[in-house]
């Protein structure tokens, strides 16, 4: 059975939508760029889950799975401790693998992107291998100090030249990067954008460089003592400053927006509620961009997978079909048709990856139907209903939702189980003997991770 046959089977007699640039972004049309960003800087308890250690074969399995889910772009970045000119065989091997991944993704018709940093430099001794980012062996250098701009931009230039064949790059404002000296601000960030855009024009005139305003508030004195609201406020102001500057930047520069104010519990709760959170971007914000015909990308994060800084959510399966749907609907309302979601431990997040792919094709698809379709992909057909029910419990009790202020929470899907009931049901689920899509790990192994995750969700009843 081909992917198309399986997915057509799932959606009944309706034909798979044709995806093209003309229809993308319109109501009922699929998103044009349906991307996944891999964050591979963390280790984890179940070591085989951490992409920090994956070889090329593991990446191939992952990318085949993404492609089968309808994802059409992948993106990598230089992780915290790796921000230097490579000096160990391990770093060089990673780059060699990634160049093979670029070719492999292209062979499947997928795009390849690379996210570049700015002021950060690895502090790992040259003969030692960089690794797990919680070790935090890196520094940021103020680009206003003599010599620092040249020292720091040498690293993103090296990675841009290495991946010069990429379809797109991003210049990531901060986290890591930026400068909190107090004198630096958006103009210093734009200096990196300008130099990298000029360099990219010579290296690969077809490629776009997105100025990604994630944590652009880290360009300026530290606002954290005032709390997250101040940080998110400056993210709006800083993004607007970038939008204003765009027409004067090289014409291969587009805009990447984190869109925190549209979906993220931390943003909603820092403003007191979802209702009190300012909407950004608005149509008026995006008009100059559209007039200048600059491409726009939403770089949304944490909803598909969470990082090691929130231990409760780290290392377990998540199911956020309703929140992914709400996010994509809000992007569609803003007429944004390019989006990149994130994965930290991709083999755990099969339900969210599947749901993301289905919703990127049609954001109106029913969350419950998506969970059932996913269950039929993983479980023996006699047990698929059990898996769908246990997944529904996981979805309703998610840690993402737990962080939401009350008015940000979405209605639960129908489910009569409690945690003990979900665990009992999950205990008896047998794997699909021959899954119709190319899973990146065995259905049995994923079911074991799913059961382990239910046991970890001790905040829920
Ligand atoms: Zn500075």
Image (tube, grey):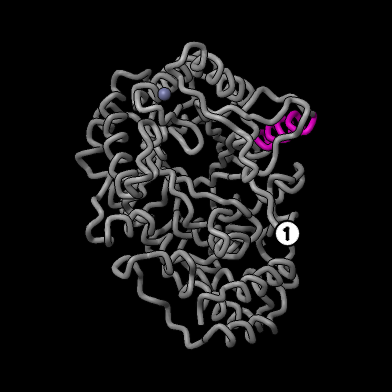
Local crowd at mark 1 within 10 Å, few (<14), some, or many (≥20)? few
| Residue 66 higher or lower than 256, as above or below | below
Instruction: Report helix, strand or loop for mark 1.
Output: loop
Count of numbered marks: 1
Q: Residue at x 57, y 42 (%)?
A: 74
Position of residue 208 measured from the top left corner of the image (x, y, whole percent): 45, 27
Name the foreground residue: 356 vs 117.
Answer: 117
Report the magenta stretch's main SS. Answer: helix
Give the image quadrant in which the ligand numbered 1 is located. Answer: top left
Does residue 40 appear anywhere in the picture?
Answer: no
Segment colored magenta: 89-103
Instruction: State the residue lying farthest toward the front.
Output: 225
* Residue 112 coordinates in the image, percent (x, y): 57, 35
Q: Is residue 102 left or right of residue 296?
A: right
Where 423 falls versus 400 (above or below)? below
Asked whether, in this view, residue 300 is left or right of residue 455, the answer is left
Location of the N terminus by quadrant is: bottom right
Beta carbon of the mark 1 residue lies under 8 A of ligand 1: no
Q: Residue at x 34, y 47 (%)?
A: 25
User: Which residue in the protein does label 1 denote?
Assistant: 46
Specify the quadrant of the image occupied by residue 7. bottom right
Horizontal and vertical percent for residue 138? 60, 33
Please name whichever residue, 229 or 334, is drawn nearer the observer in this view of the structure. Answer: 229
Q: Is 323 in the magenta?
A: no
Position of residue 214 measured from the top left corner of the image (x, y, whole percent) = 41, 39
User: Residue at the spot x=31%, y=25% of the render?
Assistant: 246
Residue 419 seen anywhere in this rendered image of the structure: yes
Does residue 96 show up magenta in the picture?
yes
- Residue at image coords 77%, 33%: 90
The residue lying toward the viewer, choosing from 218 and 355, is 218
């Amino acid at each position: 059975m081909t992917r198309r046959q399986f997915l057509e089977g799932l959606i009944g007699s309706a034909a798979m939508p044709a995806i093209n640039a003309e229809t993308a972004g319109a109501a009922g049309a699929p998103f044009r760029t349906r991307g996944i960003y891999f964050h591979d800087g963390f280790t984890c308890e179940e070591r085989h889950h951490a992409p920090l250690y994956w070889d090329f074969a593991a990446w191939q399995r992952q990318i085949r799975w993404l492609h089968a889910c309808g994802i059409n772009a992948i993106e990598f970045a230089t992780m915290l401790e790796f921000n230097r000119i490579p000096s160990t065989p391990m770093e060089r091997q990673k780059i060699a693998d990634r160049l093979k991944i670029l070719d492999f993704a292209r062979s499947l018709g997928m795009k390849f992107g690379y996210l570049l940093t700015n002021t950060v430099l690895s502090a790992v001794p040259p003969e030692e291998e960089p690794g797990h980012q919680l070790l935090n062996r890196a520094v940021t250098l103020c680009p206003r100090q003599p010599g620092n701009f040249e020292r720091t931009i040498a690293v993103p230039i090296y990675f841009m030249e290495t991946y010069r064949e990429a379809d797109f790059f991003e210049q990531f404002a901060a986290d890591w990067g930026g400068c909190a000296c107090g004198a630096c601000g958006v103009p210093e960030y734009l200096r990196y954008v300008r130099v990298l855009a000029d360099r990219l024009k010579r290296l690969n005139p077809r490629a776009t460089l997105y100025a990604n305003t994630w944590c652009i508030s880290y360009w300026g004195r530290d606002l954290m003592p005032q709390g997250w609201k101040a940080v998110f406020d400056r993210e709006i102001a800083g993004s607007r400053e970038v939008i204003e500057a765009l027409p004067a930047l090289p014409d291969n520069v587009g805009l990447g927006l984190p869109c925190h104010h549209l979906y993220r519990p931390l943003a909603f709760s820092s403003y007191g509620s979802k209702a009190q959170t300012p909407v950004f971007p608005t149509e008026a914000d995006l008009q100059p961009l559209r007039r200048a015909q600059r491409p726009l990308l939403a770089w949304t994060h944490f909803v598909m997978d969470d990082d090691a800084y929130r231990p409760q959510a780290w290392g377990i399966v998540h199911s956020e079909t309703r929140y992914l749907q709400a996010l994509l609907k809000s992007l569609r309302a803003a007429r944004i048709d390019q989006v990149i979601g994130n994965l930290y431990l991709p083999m755990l997040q099969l339900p969210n990856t599947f749901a993301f792919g289905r919703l990127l094709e049609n954001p109106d698809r029913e969350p419950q139907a998506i969970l059932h379709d996913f269950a039929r992909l993983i479980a023996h057909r006699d047990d698929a209903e059990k898996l769908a029910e246990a997944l529904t419990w996981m979805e309703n009790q998610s840690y993402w939702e737990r962080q939401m202020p009350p008015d940000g929470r979405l209605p639960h899907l129908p489910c009569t189980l409690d945690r003990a009931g979900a665990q009992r049901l999950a205990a008896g689920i047998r794997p699909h003997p021959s899954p119709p899509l190319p899973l990146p790990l065995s259905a049995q192994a994923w079911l074991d991770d799913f059961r382990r995750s239910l046991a970890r969700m001790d905040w829920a009843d």
